[in-house]
Amino acid sequence: MFCGNCGAQVPDGAAVCPKCGKQLAAKSKAPQMNQASQNAGARANGAAGGSGKKGDTKKVGIIAGAVVAVIAVVAVITLVLSLKGIFGGIRIEDGTYINISYLITVDGNKMTFSSFNNDIDYVAEYKIKDDTIVFDLDSVEFTEETLEYLEDECNYDEDEIEEKLEKCQSNVEDINGVKFEYKEKKKIIVLGKVDYEYAENYEVGPSGKFTCEDDEDITVTFEDGMATYDNHGEKETVPYYCFKLPDHVAIIFYGEDLLGSDFNEEYYEGNKTDSLCAEFDGDDELVITRTTFKQ
């Protein structure tokens, strides 16, 4: 240490300067204690500051989680309300439903109406309200295939096509607002008093090869909606629908590949539709018109 009066170096702890004799003030330990306190305080403040940051981070995480949860709930509610708005709480399985020669194909909120009796197919948007079906008549339109048929095969002009479309709109209007029911377990649409069976119920229908009882070289093989007719090595493949009735499973062969085929010519008996019908007993016997096939 040094003397504050003369600047001479003074031994640590000396009370008087050995050079000038100046009384030296006793060195206080308070500053050291204060410094120590300050250091301790700084450490404490630092610790407190770190704890505060962690707390803030935790709060931010909780808030973010809550926001995500709210968004998820809103999304679910919106989806439910949307489905109810379209289907009235009823979800019809997509696919084709059939009543004798008339068909309804469901695709989301659209229904396509068609018949084995003609090539006129038209589509309409629908929704279910209070157990009734409501169609948007302004949405009724022909399918692209039907438009091509009317223009190319029937040579219809625009006015004739419009007139034909108005008749289809009238058909839809006739069932607009009728009582609606969907039997989910059996997959049956009920429009008014008319049942439409799910026509793609292939799991209850025939599967594999069936042989003609009268000629073992004639077979029909079924696989997921397509049937292959083999007559002594000459093969033809046609699509079919399949649906369960109380006493048997109904099979309906249809489509352009059926018309003009040897298969259709052999078994068709003039049922006034562009289709060929068969009955399956649910086991190993299939009857096409009057001909029995066994598996």
Image (cartoon, grey):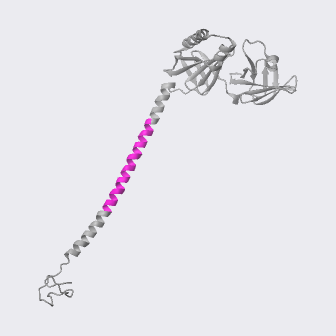
Q: Is residue 164 magenta?
A: no
**Residue 190 vertical position relative to residue 22 in the rendered view, above or below:** above
Tell me residue 204's x, y (percent): 70, 28
Left or right: residue 243 versus residue 68 is: right
Left or right: residue 34 versus residue 89 is: left
- Image quadrant where residue 272 sits: top right
Left or right: residue 122 versus residue 276 is: left
Q: Residue at x 38, y 46 (%)?
A: 63
**Residue 119 vertical position relative to residue 218 in the rendered view, above or below:** above
Tell me residue 169's x, y (percent): 56, 12
Tell me residue 81's x, y (percent): 46, 29
Tell me residue 117's x, y (percent): 69, 13
Q: Main secondary structure of the magenta part?
A: helix
Rendered-image quadrant of the N terminus: bottom left
Q: Which residues are magenta?
A: 47-74
Q: Say which of 146 and 127 sits in front.
A: 146
The number of numbered discs placed on residues in the rendered structure image is 0
Q: Is residue 70 magenta?
A: yes
Q: Residue at x 43, y 39 (%)?
A: 71
Q: Residue at x 20, y 78 (%)?
A: 29
Q: Say which of 7 and 163 sits in front.
A: 7
Rendered-image quadrant of the C terminus: top right
Q: Is residue 224 visible?
A: yes
Q: Say which of 86 and 24 sits in front.
A: 24
**Residue that protrudes farthest toward the bottom in the picture:** 18
Left or right: residue 50 versus residue 136 is: left
Q: Is residue 102 visible?
A: no
